[in-house]
Every structure is written in structure tokens, then in C-alpha cells.
Amino acid sequence: MPDPRFFDDMGPASLDELARLGGAELADATLASRSIAHVAPLDAADGRAVTFFSDAKRRDAAGSTQAAACFVRPEHRALLAPDCAALLTAHPQAAWAAAAMRLHAPRRHEPLSPSIHPDCDLEEGVSLSPGVTVGQGARIGRGTRLSPGCVIGPGVAIGRDCVIGANAVIGFAIIGDRVSIHAGAVIGEAGFGAAGGPRGVVDIPQLGRVVIQDGVTVGANSCIDRGAFADTMIGENTKIDNLAHVAHNVRLGRNCVLAAYTGLSGSTVVGDGVAFGGKAGVADHLAIGAGASIGASASVFKDVPAGETWTGFPARPLKRWLRETAWLSRMARGRGTRG
């Protein structure tokens, strides 16, 4: 379930209430009073959770889920585990989003509280510049410097000897030692999740965290989104340039390098020691093997094996790209000669 340092528990709620909120129909009316405490994905749900099923590729997870209930399209009802109550809807993910907002609320800064909340924990030697805000329950380690105007959200944990740049905003995050986050960076905002519903497109609540390990650098005005449910992970000693974007649920390995304007789409898994040139882009749910290199402005739409160098649009192995580029150049020159 969501980390209580960052999300308040607003449950429980009955299946009848959640069905009404999500515009769903409870397939077995005798289960209307069943109590639900939290939301969860199919494969992480327990007997007090509600989940959703909308992707036929996950039929095995639907059949083995331990969830108490599941939002599901009528035609998929038979795929659910026998003890899982079916909440029938044409829009399972949007209905689940309504349930998530009912059961969990992101913790926000308390209104009218001091800028340095009395319930935060600052070790000796923390340096606070003018205009810093630190929320309730935040913990900051010895020797860390908070620059002017930075905002540290409720529950955030920051290790020792870190530098947080001016006007950086950090929430829903656990950060290790010796981390540098430069001016204007935003860590832990909601990732991009949306689903179509009967009233149009709705936001999907993002209930995960950002975990940044020791020695990481995050450049100015870069964004690292919190996970949709699991965590976004940045591995030890990875260096991220200015104006880069790491989307929700990305797992970025150790000693990686991301040049400016790099964008990693949701649920991408990147091995250790991977280098991304400027403006490189990676589609969602891909795997980039350890030691790979992605060229500047490359657009990756397929998994990249470990140790390979890919570039181009769409990205492919460097030698292949060079051959194709040379061939195209010869063809262009040939046409020009005949003209």
C-alpha cells in the first residue's frame, strides 16, 4: 500500500460506495458491504485491496490476484480469481482512479504552518538559506545545504552532505547521501498517467515514490516523477544533466549519464553504466542493457542489448545506421548527377 509518510489513509470504503464513485456495477450484490482499505495493482493486491484489469495480456495476473475486488469490463469477468468481487465497468482504470482518490490522499504542507515545520527532523549542521520550506515529518541529514527558496515536502528524507539548489522542489522522495539537486529541479511530482472515462480523460493517481541513491547529481530544471504505484529509482552515482525528464516507474542503474533533454518514458529499465546523448528519447516499458550507449537525438522504440551503441530515428545499432546513412547519401548524389 502507499507509503504513509507521503499518503494519508482515507479508508475504508464499502464496495457499494466504490462502485457508485466509479460508475460501476457490482456483479454480486450480496458483497456490497465488503470493506476495502486500499488500492493496489493486480499482482500486489491483498484481501483488503481493490484493483483493476484492462489489459488482456495480464490475464494470468487476473486469475491469480488476491484482491478483494477488481474493476473489470463485463466480457473479462470470467478471467478473475474466484474470490475476487467483480465491479463491472467499460472504463476499469478510470473507475479505479476514483477509488484511489477516495482511499488515499497525498500529504501536503499544512496550511499556515511555519516554513520550517516543528515536526521535521533536522540533524546538526543542516544549512538553511532564506525562503526555505520544510514540511511536516521531513528528515534532513547532517551537512546538507538547502539553498534559497527550495521546498521540501512532508515526509521527505534527505541524507547527509547533500546540496539542494535554489527553488528546487522535492516531494514523495527518499534521497541518499552526497546528492546534488540543482536549481529548479522538481523531484516527486505526479507522473503522466491518464485514462478515458465516461466524462472524458481523467488523471490516474500516482501513489509511488522517488528513491535516489548516494552520489547522484540532478541538473537544473530536470524532472523526476514519482512512481504510479511502485518506485522510480535512480541508481548510485548516476549523473543527470539539465532539462532531463525521468518518468514514473523508471529504474535507472548506477553510474549512468544522461545529457540535457534526455527523456525516459514510464517503466523503462536501464542497466548500470548506460550513457544517453543529448535529446535522446526512450519509449515506455523498454529495457536498456548495462553499458549501452544511446546517441544524441536517438529515438529508441525497442530493447537495446547490453554494451551496444544505438542511434538514429528510429534508433538502431550504430554500424547499421552508418551503412544506411552512407547508402542514402550515395543514392541522393546519384539522383543529383542524373538530373
Image: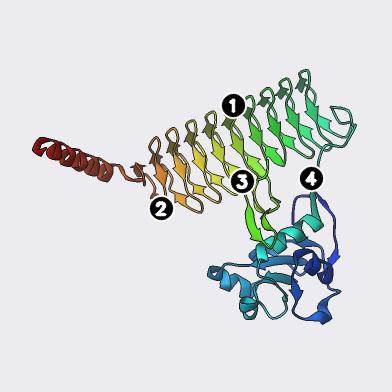
Residue 5 image label: 4
Distance (Cα) linking label 3 and label 2: 21 Å
Q: In the figure, 220 relative to 267: above or below? A: above
Where residue 186 sits in the image (x, y, percent)?
A: 65, 34
Q: Is residue 260 visible?
A: yes
Looking at the rendered image, the quarter that the C terminus falls into is top left
Q: Give the class, few, some or many, for how many residues have Cα within 10 Å of label 2's Cα (few <14, many ≥20).
A: some
Within-10-Å neighbours for mark 3: few <14, some 14–19, many 20+? many
Q: Identify the mark nearer the N-term, 4 or 3.
A: 4
- Is tag 3's residue or tag 2's residue first in the polypeptide sequence? 3
Residue occupied by mark 3: 232
The mark that comes first in sequence, 2 or 4, is 4
**Which residue appears at 20% of the width and 38% of the height?**
329
Res 220 label: 1
Tell me residue 322's x, y (percent). 25, 40
What residue sits right under mark 2 in the picture?
302
Kind of residue at badge 2 = Lys
Q: CA distance from mark 4 to mark 3?
A: 16 Å
Q: What SS does tag 4 mark?
A: loop
CA gap, disc 2 and disc 4 = 37 Å
The structure residue drawn at horizontal position 81% and vertical position 34%, both measured from the top left corner, is 135
Helix, strand, or loop for circle 1?
loop
Task: Specify few, some or many for label 4: CA neighbours under 10 Å numbering under 14, 14-19, or 20 or more.
Answer: some
| Amino acid type at image mark 3 | Thr
Q: Secondary structure at mark 3?
A: strand
Q: Foreground: 90 or 232?
A: 90
25 and 199: which one is in front? Answer: 199
- Name the outermost residue toward the top: 130
Q: Residue furthest left?
A: 338
